[in-house]
Amino acid sequence: MKKYLLSFASFVVLSTATQADTYLASTWLDPGHILTKDAYVPYLEDIKTATGGKVDFELHTSASLLPPLTTLSGVGDGVAQIGLVAASYTPSELPLSGLMNDLAFLARDPMAISLAFTELLMFDQRFIDEYARHNTVALGGYSTPIYLFACMKDVVSAEDARGTKFRTNGRAQNEFAGALGGVPVSVPINDVYSGLERGSLDCALIESTNLVTGPRLGEVIRSVTKIGLGTGMGVSYVYNKDFWNDIGPEARRQILDVTARGIATQQIGYETAAGQALEQSEASGTKVNEPQQSLLDKLEAFRQTVAATYPEFTQTTYNVADPSDIAKQYQELEQKWIDLLAGIDRSDVDAVAELIHAEIFSKIDENSHAL
């Protein structure tokens, strides 16, 4: 049975949209963010073209429709038919996806780890079921570039980090900040700029594109430290399950066939923008630092605990079956995709999309997937 919005105004919008085959898409990021302009804008246009206009989305950005904390439930309830979901905001609702985000602290290659996550989302029944419990269907993962420190002061040593208030994203980053003797603070990315300005934050653990796009933290911070803190993970394309069922197999096939290109576009966009952002910030006066050995030693000691202890934590905290095999497969899949990507030009959208489609989406049955 379809789920509908409770407010009369929203009901009218959805009713009219449904009659016109126009649906609602939601991202809590601003129009200039990679996950909006590269992951959503061209992807939704590709869906409209592929379906001959039968499926057409109206995109709402900047949390104007759904904020990050309620996107999962909002998509499940039909407030939007597709949305961007980060499990770090709802770890109890998405424990396996949250574990993947935590293990991404160990990630070496952002594009490869995003495709490893996508492969799990599409083929592992445990992930399909995890989203189905919220009346949703997950079609593709994203990974940010490698995280670093963006601070109001220089933080290059273990001593510098002690007592520092770090904005973090997910359990691994929280615990690493704590291991440094710092204070982890979990706030949405949209609130980080003001937190740094007010002094409620000293540093943010972010990926470099956040310096010049999205929250534009390069306008307020004074120092960057290039310490490799893995990546941030999420699901680019989470669909309402009733919508996924109602559009039928032909439209599902058409959407599946363009999703590979959406993922390729977002990850290439991220890789290109990451290097440019650091260069632009440094040119604008931000100090770019290398970490001292004391900080690197703390990081290496912490990394060793992540893979060994996090699956058990997820199992006991969220009462799920032992996910150790998923954690192991996740890391193996990253290496698989590193090897596959080495055989193509990974800056070529067509080449990357063709590889993703061949390895993942061409193998999905539109007649049965996630139904």
Image: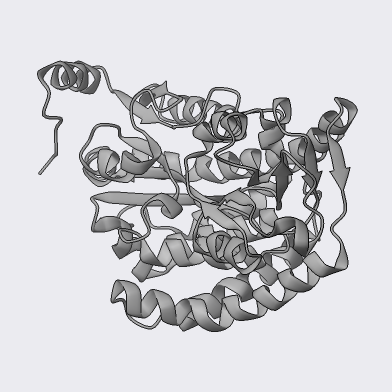
Which residue sits at x=43%, y=82%? 312
The N terminus is located in which quarter?
top left
Which residue sits at x=33%, y=26%? 65
Of residue 260 and residue 284, the one placed in the foreground of this image is 284
Residue 64 in picture, x, y percent from top left = 37, 23
Residue 288 in picture, x, y percent from top left = 86, 42
Of residue 75 and residue 119, the one placed in the foreground of this image is 75
The image quadrant that residue 199 belongs to is: top right
The image quadrant that residue 283 belongs to is: top right
Q: Is residue 280 left or right of residue 265?
A: right
Which residue sits at x=31%, y=62%? 130
Residue 320 in picture, x, y percent from top left = 31, 76
Q: Is residue 322 left or right of residue 204?
A: left
Of residue 190 and residue 337, the one placed in the foreground of this image is 190
In the picture shown, does residue 114 fall above or below 9? below
Residue 258 in picture, x, y percent from top left = 52, 39
In the picture shown, does residue 289 fall above or below 300? above
The C terminus is located in which quarter?
bottom left
- Look at the image and tell me whether residue 347 can be seen: no
